[in-house]
Image: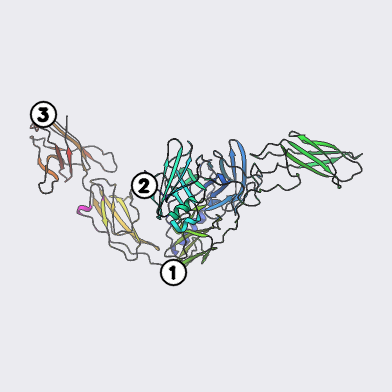
Amino acid sequence: MQTTRLGTGRRPRRLPRITRARIAALAVGVAASATVGGVVASAAVPAFPDNVVVFPDRDFVTIEGYQDHIGEQATVTVMRGGTLMGSAVGTVAEGDVAFEINHPGGYCWGAGGGPNVTPDIQKGDKVSIRFADNTNGDTTVSTGTATKHAVLDGNTVTVEGTYGSDVNPAQVEVRIVNPDLTPLVGKRDVRAAPGDLTPAPKGGYQSGLTMNADGTFKATFLFESADAAKAAAAPQVERFMSWQVEDADANRQGLTISEFGESGGPGMGGCPAGPGDVAPPKASYTVTRSATDKSKMAVKWTAADPIPGAAAITGYSVEAIKSDGTLVGARTNAGATGVTLTVDPAVTTYDVEVRTMTGAKLGEPFTLAPPTGTGDLPADQTIPKLTANPAAGDELTPTEATSVSLASESAADVYFTTDGSLVLTGDLPSDSAQLYKGTPIAIKELTQLRAVAIDRAGNMSQRIIGYYAPPVAQQPATPTAPVLAQPTGADVGKTSVKLSWAKVDNATSYLVTAYTDAGVALPAAQQPGETSNLSQTIAGLAGSTPYRFKVVAINAAGQSQASNEVRVVTQENLTIGTARWKNGDFRVTGSSSATNGTVTVLRAVRNATTGQLEPGAAFTAAANSTVAFTATLASAAPAAGTTYDWRLRTNVPTANPGQIFVKSSGGGVAGPFTVSNG
């Protein structure tokens, strides 16, 4: 069962803490990084923050990230096997979304000279992006899809569908989108991830997703209100999302968003029709008339390139038309590239038309512009306008403000993030995006604002991405250094140390750094994270080992100087590995984090007051009741540990002693431990 479910998309990235004293240094760093040459990437699923997101049912592609290529052109292609089905050239814009294809405000398929057709993107197609420097990435369209519209039963809504072997059942999600859900559950969509019914982070419903071994799935949404359930069942467009790669930060790469119930085709007026509706292709042609008797007219053309996915070219129609409408014509097979027509020598001018034929369908004359699609287009294609007051600055020169207000047309919802995370995933608000409800966004520290407006038809505004900082007079001073207390007693464990420090008034958080006794910082994986508490337990340490610790205070202005340093030696980590008894032989083995010492084996006795087992009397048999450690390297660096092997051959208990403790001369205690027979 998955315990962290809804809201597990991209994890927020912590903003860098920037003071005006550091801006000059940052500017130098930016200039230096600009000199680094491009890296040639091999074809693969893009790595975050870059992504290729495919909506196959709408033949819609959104390109995310690629912000190191702002202003550059990239070619996006759709390949089916080795066949090019469609392509478009777009220019990368600044923002979360570099550009989109077949979506209002984006590019049409065929832009930049590709096939003049909107490809019918299908499962298994590979959608790729490539730049001039060979930077590239691709997404293979997955097979998962809903197969039934949402079913309403009381307050429960279910969605069923299928998926293929290419889909990782742990990397999927089912969503239902309806703007009417926003006032009911706090978002315009509801989501179900693999696992049992789990409450949504914003409340309003529970959801779960069962991925069956036979390739079927069922998503269940249990709502708190009947109105919310009805709104979820109303749209009749159900999304099944699957992704090829999920990185360590839960970013979903190579994302396919299948939309059961979408009609597909061109996403905006003026874009080419799909393969089933596009007119036959055109090509160029030339006309040469006989010089002497003017009775012959030779018409030649280049073969028209077939449109991917459309009907095959079956031939060509050639007509020479007089001003009175009468004509002379011929039809050829698909392999022909010219005909000779017999015309009236007395007619000086003929209009010539060459058209491609696909079965009974006749194309437009070669001399005319290509046709455009006439499929079902959204009634509302007006992109909402989003504004921020005051306008945002950049990272080096953030706008000084105490708050920021966002505004858009009344029918649009505005979403925003202030933690550096993306505001959009595909064409929906990201998991970390917040719905703007009219209350100005307070600016208390350097803040990166990302915002977008989405209207009921799904049209999206241009993204706002920029930086704000509090006015200089309101910015806090760098905090003073904390005072770190010396841990003692129960605060010092075998593998952990609890640290405490005094509160720093203007600090918002604290960060501890752990060092070896020689003053070398431990690896990043062993360092504790930032905390707002006044104490923190540092775990994963070795026993019988000295460590040093410091802590700094943090606020929007930056970090304080380091605190005083404390040195702590962890307690001895004494273990019992085996304890075996048989008639005439009693043997106990184990290890210790201490480098020298002895161990004593004791009976376990029960405390009459507490009922707990405690160390009792030692087993004795002349000299071997106490056994010295034998030096050996422990398996976990950097500590050097030891082992012991305690054994009685005389004065052995006549019966299995049951449970035991082991004590070391360094104060370590292990037990109770159950003695086995044999």
User: 645 or 629, which is in the foreground?
Assistant: 645
Residue that carries the numbered disc 2 in the rendered image: 3
Q: Secondary structure at mark 3?
A: loop
Q: Which residues are magenta?
A: 483-496
Q: Mark 1 and mark 3: span between their CA atoms? A: 82 Å
Is mark 3 in CB contact (under 8 Å) with mark 2?
no
User: 44 or 21, which is in the foreground?
Assistant: 44
**Around disc 1, counting alpha carbons within 10 Å, would you say few (fewer than 14), some (14 to 19), or many (20 or more)?**
few
Res 34 seen here: no
Q: Which mark is residue 272?
A: none
Magenta span includes 486: yes
Q: Judge left or right: residue 182 versus residue 674.
A: right
Residue that carries the numbered disc 1 in the rendered image: 472
Lower sequence index among marks 1 and 3: 1
Q: Residue at x 46, y 38 (%)?
A: 216
Q: Position of residue 269 (x, y in %)?
A: 64, 52
Magenta span includes 555: no
